[in-house]
Amino acid sequence: DIRMTQSPASLSASLGETVNIECLASEDIYSDLAWYQQKPGKSPQLLIYNANSLQNGVPSRFSGSGSGTQYSLKINSLQSEDVATYFCQQYNNYWTFGGGTKLELK
Amino acid sequence: EVQLVESGGGLVQPGRSLKFSCAASGFTFSDYAMAWVRQAPKKGLEWVATIIYDGSSTYYRDSVKGRFTISRDNAKSTLYLQMDSLRSEDTATYYCARHPYGYTPFDYWGQGVMVTVSS
């Protein structure tokens, strides 16, 4: 099974700041990597797929990068509505999620 | 507008069974694979099962193989999950999710249904 390790587990940032979340796969997943946002009490929403492709309707302040086993999600100019938990997911071999990163406002 | 609406969760005793459903609308259901993903309270996401567009192939995580059955009725645009021999560790919110055929991300999710396994 492919394991996904996300860091940090929690993060506190100020409005307008740039935030980075990392995801490490236990083996090469060939950019088969997605990022999801889950707000409290809501279902997850797809933000990024294929490591760096923005899902329709997602603000351009979100971006993804990476290859091989290392990937990251970047949020530019943090907004209050970005407070959520973020999950990475590999879909190269079945589907595995990272443990999540809880993003809060400082 | 794509909509996925789960129903049928609840409280069930260990060892018993439960079946719930996900009604889809706003897209051609038979064109897509569908999945169940669960989230234990205050925990992360865990893929449970996937069924391809025509129901001819299904895939399960190891911990539910032989106990859970994913199925679909394309005429009713409905996805199902039959859960047998339930355990306390199956307690979670269960989401149905849509994804294109093959190994792809989940682009739409339902609102989730809570399942509590407890005596």
Image (cartoon, coloured by chain):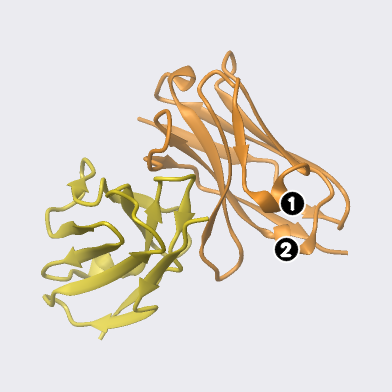
Q: Position of residue B100 (x, y in %)?
A: 39, 30
Nearer to us in this view, A66 or B109: A66
- Mark 2 surroundings: few (<14), some (14-19) or many (≥20) residues within 10 A: few
Q: Residue at x 55, y 21 (%)?
A: B77
The earlier-in-sequence mark between 2 and 1 is 1
Q: Position of residue B106 (x, y in %)?
A: 41, 42
Dividing the image into 4 quarters, which one contains the C terminus of chain A?
bottom left
Query: Which chain does the yellow colour mark?
Result: A
Which residue corresponds to mark 1? B10
Q: Position of residue B18 (x, y in %)?
A: 78, 43
- Chain of residue at mark 1: B
Q: Colour of chain B?
A: orange
**Type of residue at label 2?**
Glu
Give the SS element for disc 2.
helix
**Type of residue at label 1?**
Gly
Which residue corresponds to mark 2? B89
- Judged by depth in the image, the label closer to the viewer, 2 or 1, is 2
Q: Residue at x 70, y 41 (%)?
A: B8
Question: Furthest residue to the top?
Answer: B75
Q: Is mark 2 in CB contact (under 8 Å) with mark 1?
A: no
- Mark 1 surroundings: few (<14), some (14-19) or many (≥20) residues within 10 A: some
Spatial CA distance of label 2 from label 1 is: 15 Å
Residue A64 vertical placement versus B97 (above, below): below
Residue A98 vertical placement versus A34 (above, below): below
Question: Furthest residue to the bottom?
Answer: A106
Q: Residue at x 27, y 71 (%)?
A: A21
Nearer to us in this view, A5 or A103: A5
Give the SS element for disc 1.
strand
Q: Position of residue B117 (x, y in %)?
A: 78, 59
**How many numbered discs?**
2
* In-image side of A16 versus B12 (left or right): left
Instruction: Find residue A72 and name its label.
Output: none
